[in-house]
Amino acid sequence: MKTAPEGVKGYRRLIPSLTALVDFEAVARLSSFTLAAAELGVTQAAVSRQIRFLEDTLGVRLFYRLHRSIQLTSEGEQLYQVISDSMRRIAGTFDRLSMGSLEQEVVLASTAAFSHFRVLPQLSALQKAQPHLRLRLITQMFTADLRHNEVDLAVRYGNGKWGDGTATFLFGEEVFPVCSPAWLAAHQTPATLEELAQLPLIESDATSEGWMGWEGWFQAAGFRAPRLNYVLRCSLYTDAIQAVLLGQGVVLGWRRLVDALLDAGQLVRVTAATVKVQDAYFAVVPHGRSGSPATEHLIEWLRGAPIWTD
């Protein structure tokens, strides 16, 4: 029988309670003792005892107990990053072994516009290049804390500085007016930004930091319009694009989202005027989850680089 080398501690001595670690992960992820207890099927008092035992064992405080909420301390953040990543790896291995296959599921979060215009049209290419990868898409209208979601990777638009994950630059962006070919053929092409402001404009609500509307676009282009001719406002960019495809007016085209529609001739540019924005698209891996090979392949695919197979 093999024995541990002298002076080397076994895991049971270094990690006195796996139950406490499981409880800690749930509390940290949900930011709630009550929700963690409900998920684990135990009482809140039992969860509190496990967390207190863990804090006493480590000799550090893991949570700040506030009036109506809790918050991880810096030590708690360090422990959560390791525990979350480790548990996810264990769960993923269990899942693959129990399924009896080599399939790898990656949960990708993005806005509806990004998944609709950029991910879904190229999904067959991804499946061909990575036949074992199974993609699960989650739509987020607004930026959500990745620690509280079962997400492997999120696509975000912004400055790349977020506290809940590690961001990898994908690509920049520029914005310009677009419409349907039929609409442009039936109307006179605007010669100036002032004429453009009088056209029937379609607006979509901001769903992320840095999202630019018509008013901001005109200001960035050097023109302050006294009044804009809005004919339709949509909460989703996908609806705004659909309205334009049906010949309802003019919308701001985000190049990385409408490139395929422009190439197919379904959309055309109204003018040559364009605004290059400072923000960009980033792939964000949540803290506590190291990027798996499947995740890294997905990031390269999102960036547009060649995808390789194992």
Image (cartoon, helix red, strand yellow):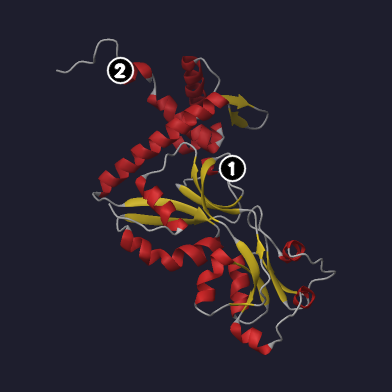
Q: Is residue 123 visible?
A: yes
Q: Nearer the viewer, residue 72 or 302?
A: 302
Q: Is residue 95 left or right of residue 75?
A: left
Residue drawn at x 17%, y 18% is 2
Residue drawn at x 52%, y 33% is 28
The x and y percentages for residue 23 are 46, 30
Up the image or down, 277 lies above or below 36; here it is below
Could you give the CA–CA distance between mark 1 and mark 2, rounded to whole angstroms?
A: 37 Å
Return the residue at label 2. 10
Q: Amino acid at mark 2?
A: Gly
Considering every residue shown, the one lying at the far left of the view is: 1
Q: In which quadrant of the rendered image does the N terminus lie?
A: top left
Residue drawn at x 82%, y 69% is 225
User: Crowdedness of circle 2 by 10 Å Cα count: few (<14), some, many (20+)?
Assistant: few
Q: Amino acid at mark 1?
A: Trp
The x and y percentages for residue 289 are 44, 39
- Which numbered disc covers residue 162? 1
First in sequence, mark 1 or 2: give its number.
2
Q: Nearer the viewer, residue 275 or 282?
A: 275
Considering every residue shown, the one lying at the far top of the view is: 6
